[in-house]
Amino acid sequence: MTNELYRPQFHFSPQQNWMNDPNGLVYFHGEYHLFYQYHPHGTTWGPMHWGHAISKDLVHWEHAPITLEPDEHGQIFSGSAVVDWQDTTGFFNGEVGLVAIFTHHDQDPDSDLPRERQSLAYSSDSGRTWTKYSGNPVLTDSRFPDFRDPKVFWHTQTNQWVMILASGQTVSIYHSANLKDWSFASQFGDGEGAHVGVWECPDLFELAIDGDPARTKWVMLVSIGNSPEHREGSRTQYFIGDFDGTAFKNDASPETVQWLDGGRDNYAGVSWSDIPAKDGRRIYIGWMSNWKYAQVTPTESWRSAMTMPRSLALISRKDQIILVQQPVHELNHLKLGTYKWNETIVEPGQNLLSKLDLPYFVIEAEFELQTAAEFGLKVRTSNFSETVVGYEMEKQEIFVDRSRSGEVSFHADFSGRHAVKAETSDGRLKLQIWVDTSSIEVFAGEGEAVITDLIFPGEEEQGLEIYALHGTVKLISLNITPLKSIWTYNGVPQSNV
Ligand code: FRU
C-alpha cells in the first residue's frame, strides 16, 4: 500500500485496480474473509474475479491472492460463502470446509445457455486455495436474463440451506440439502418497495428485537441498480417481516420504501455473523461507491473502498420496529488521544475548533437543541472547501452537503446534499461522524439515520468547524479523536498525529 492522496486509512481498499461489491463474507476459525468483485487488469469494471483479504479483527486486513478467476462458464459475479459444518456437500470427507456460491456470468452472444447461473467452489484449507465444483452450474433459470448474486445461509428452524437471489426486479428463494441440488421455494417483490432499477445483491437474515432472542424479525436487503432516469444512482432498500423458511412476508404496506442509507455510497452490501446464534451480532459491510460515477472517481492506481463494518440490530420505538447500524466496536482500537469539550453554547460566527487540523478522525457529539435553525460540523475545510454535516431543525433531518467537498467535477451527479429524517430524543441529538481521507459516515441517535458519502478533499483541506445558524445550540459533549491507519507502509505502522 502507498500513502497516496485519497487512499482510505481505516477502510478496506484493494492494493491496486478496480473493486466493486463485497462477496462471501464469512467468519471461520478466528478469521474474517472478505472476497470482492475485482478486475485485476484495470481501474474500471472489467472481467470479474473474486479478490480476497483476511482479517483477525475486522479492522486490519491482509491482502490475499485472487480466489476465483473467470473460466469456461464466464466471469465470476457476486455471491456468498458458507461454512459447511456438516459436510452436506461431501466435498470435505466428513470434515469442515468453506463453500462459495457465486454467479457465473456469460456474455457470449452465441451461447444458448442462460446468461447467468449459480456455481460452487470449495476450500479445505481455510480459504487459501479453492476448487471449482465439476458439476457447475448448480442452478439456472432461463426466464431471467438477470439471475444473480446468491446469498446462502443455513436455516436452523427447518434444517436446510436457503438461497435468495436477484431475479429481474424480484428475488427468488430456493432450498437445498447439499448446496448442489436446489428446489424453488418462493418469489418476493412484485409491487413491493422501490423498482427504479434492476434488483441486485439481496440478503435475508433474522435479528432479535431490542436484544431479546425470543422476539425476532427477518430483514431483507435489496440493492437497486443504477438507471439513467434515476439521478440518485445505486441504493439499497430494506424490508422487515417474517420468514418461515419458504416465503418472506413484508410487514410494511407494499408501496413503502425504506432506504438503508441516506447517502449515495453504500451499495451491494452483505451481512454475516461471527456468532452462530440468533442473538449473536450481525455485521454488515457495503461497497462504498455508486454505479452512477464509480468508474470515474478521481483515484489513480486503484478504485473503490468498502464501508466500515457495522453491526445491525432492531429496536422498538413507539409502535415501530427500526433497523439501526453502528460501527463495530473493534474500530475503537484505532482511536488515539481525544480532544474533549463539555457544556458549551455554540453561537453564530464563532468556531471552537479553529485550531484543529485533521485528515482522518472520528467526531462524537451530543447537542441539546435551542434556537438555531441549523447547526452541525464542517470537516476537511479550507478557505475554498468544506463538507458539511448538519441538522435542520424544521425538517428534523440530518444531512451531508458535499457540494464544496474538494474534487466534485468528475461527474455531474456527484455534487449534492443528502438528507434523511433523524428524530431527536428529549430535545437532544447524538452524532458520530467518521471521516477518512475520501469518505464520511454519519450515524445519528442509535444509528437509525445513517449517511455514507464519498468526498475527495485535497491534502491541505483539514480544517474543522462547529457552527450554528440563526440562533444557538448547546453542546453537551464533543469528542474529536484522530485515528491510527490500518495499513503499514514499508513495515511501519502509520498514525496521523
Ligand atoms: C452489483 C453488481 C452485481 C453483480 C456484480 C458484477 O454492484 O452489478 O449484481 O453480480 O455487481 O460485478
Image (cartoon, grey):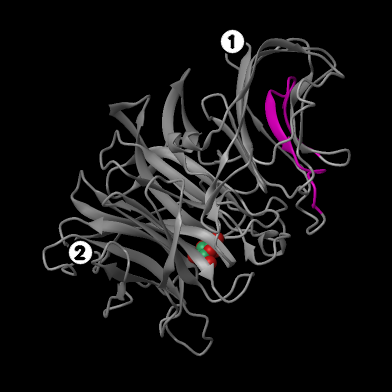
Q: Residue tagged by mark 2?
A: 178
* Label 2 CB-ligand 1 distance < 8 A: no
Vertical order, 176 against 459 (above or below): below
What is the magenta range?
386-408
Vertical order, 371 against 81 (above or below): above
Q: Say which label, 1 or 2, has the lower sequence index.
A: 2
Q: Secondary structure at mark 1?
A: loop
The quadrant of the image that shows the C terminus is top right
Give the residue drawn at x 58%, y 74%. 46
Mark 1 vs mark 2, foreground winner is 1
Give the residue drawn at x 55%, y 59%. 490
The answer to which of 243 and 324 lies nearer the viewer is 324
Give the residue drawn at x 79%, y 45%. 460
The image quarter in which residue 375 lies: top right
The amino acid type found where label 1 is placed reads Asp
Q: Secondary structure at mark 2?
A: loop
State left or right for residue 459 relative to residue 220: right
Give the residue drawn at x 55%, y 39%. 258
- Percent x, y for residue 164? 37, 56
The amino acid type found where label 2 is placed reads Asn
The answer to which of 257 and 213 lies nearer the viewer is 213
The quadrant of the image that shows the N terminus is bottom right
Is any atom of residue 306 visible in this view?
no
Instruction: Decide: few, some or many residues near mark 1? Use Cα within 10 Å; few <14, some 14-19, many ≥20.
Output: few
Q: Residue tagged by mark 1?
A: 426
Q: Is residue 391 magenta?
A: yes
State left or right for residue 85 relative to residue 143: left
The image quarter in which residue 45 lies: bottom right
The answer to which of 383 and 488 lies nearer the viewer is 488
- Percent x, y for residue 79? 41, 62
The image quarter in which residue 371 lies: top right
